[in-house]
Amino acid sequence: MAIYSLGAINADSFYRVDRCPLNGETVVAHDCSLGLGGKGVIQSVAAARAGSQVHHIGSVGDDGVWAVEQLKSMGVDVTHVAIELGKPSGHALIFVEPDGENRIVIYPGTNRMIEEADVKTALARAQAGDMLLLQNETNAQLYAARRARSRGMRVAYSAAPLENAAVNDLLPFVDLLLLSATKAESLSGALGVPLSELPVAELIVTEGAKGATWHDLNSGETLKVSAPTVDPVDTTGAGDTFAGYFCAGRDQGAPVVECLELAVTAAALKVTRAGTSEAIPTLDEVRIFRSEAVTAG
């Protein structure tokens, strides 16, 4: 099987600060770096490093050719990444505090210029049972979800950044919905329904350092897995690393509990490293780290 990931491609500028500035205040960063990020990129790289065949669908400007080459070098197929001449690629400013927490400002750029025709072409070779992975940093998600469903694909939706209207439109076409605990509570309130009544087959609620819970909303079955204890360096991309690893596990037919265990471990290991896509661990690293954490526990 394969995963088709429609997602953002960003140039991530990291600034390490003692604290984020208040209104009207200037603070000095004591370190800065540039990396390849975007929720879509992180999910794609994570799924590829977890062993799945991943086709990324996205768009960059001519200033983003380096990003496409780097994404390709990380094992992701970039055949369907368009290059928009004269248009600005997406980029993000990420301020990281000493405890690893961050604040992020994103400029979407070409991530919001994806053509539906390009999505149609990208999905033309997808097979029934393949997976479409979506998030909220691009346009064309609804078109892609409808197209995927018409081809018998499974649709996984990492609903972040949370946009209630987008979620409401997409839910009828979603098989697996992934939300953080705070976003799950917010969405439930906005839609006026408890999480158990959302119109999807599966729901995952991530809780950061506490782990994650999988819900089968048809049968009522629930599985919860705790995350290994770590000292965080940079939490950027942890949720997307989780999403990529979990979806890769499902794509490969692994049991849900194994998918959860690998995903929470990959996310925990990622936050011990600075950066985004380049900080995503390999499957071997995740398995070794999980084994060591279980032994230590």
Image (tube, helix red, strand yellow):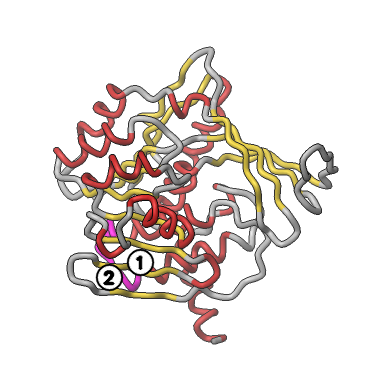
Q: Pick whichever, 63 or 78, lies toward us.
A: 63
Q: Majority secondary structure of the magenta segment?
A: helix
What is the x, y in percent for residue 184? Answer: 41, 58
Q: Is residue 177 magenta?
A: no
Q: Who's the residue at 49% across and 56% down the image? A: 239
In which image quadrant can residue 217 be found?
Answer: bottom left
Q: Which residue, as the protein is rendered here, is positioned at the far top? A: 86
Q: Who's the residue at 46% across and 62% down the image? A: 181
Q: Is residue 70 above or below residue 84?
A: below
CA–CA distance in space, label 2 to label 1: 6 Å
Q: Who's the residue at 78% across and 52% down the image? A: 19
Looking at the rendering, in which quadrant would you find the C terminus?
A: bottom right
Direction from residue 64 to residue 79 in the image, left or right: left
Mark 1 is surrounded, within 10 Å at the Cα level, by few (under 14), some (14 to 19) or many (20 or more) other residues, namely many
What is the x, y in percent for residue 70? Answer: 53, 37
| Residue range highlighted in magenta | 250-259
Direction from residue 104 to residue 165 in the image, left or right: left
What is the x, y in percent for residue 58? Answer: 41, 31
Q: Pick whichever, 112 or 265, lies toward us.
A: 112
Q: Tell me which amino acid carries mark 1.
A: Cys
> What residue is pinned by disc 2?
255
Q: Is residue 111 above or below residue 160?
A: above
Mark 2 is surrounded, within 10 Å at the Cα level, by few (under 14), some (14 to 19) or many (20 or more) other residues, namely few
Q: Is residue 235 above or below residue 14?
A: below
- Does the CB distance between marks 2 and 1 fall below 8 Å? yes
In which image quadrant can residue 27 be found?
Answer: top right
Q: Tell me which amino acid carries mark 2.
A: Pro
> What residue is pinned by disc 1?
259
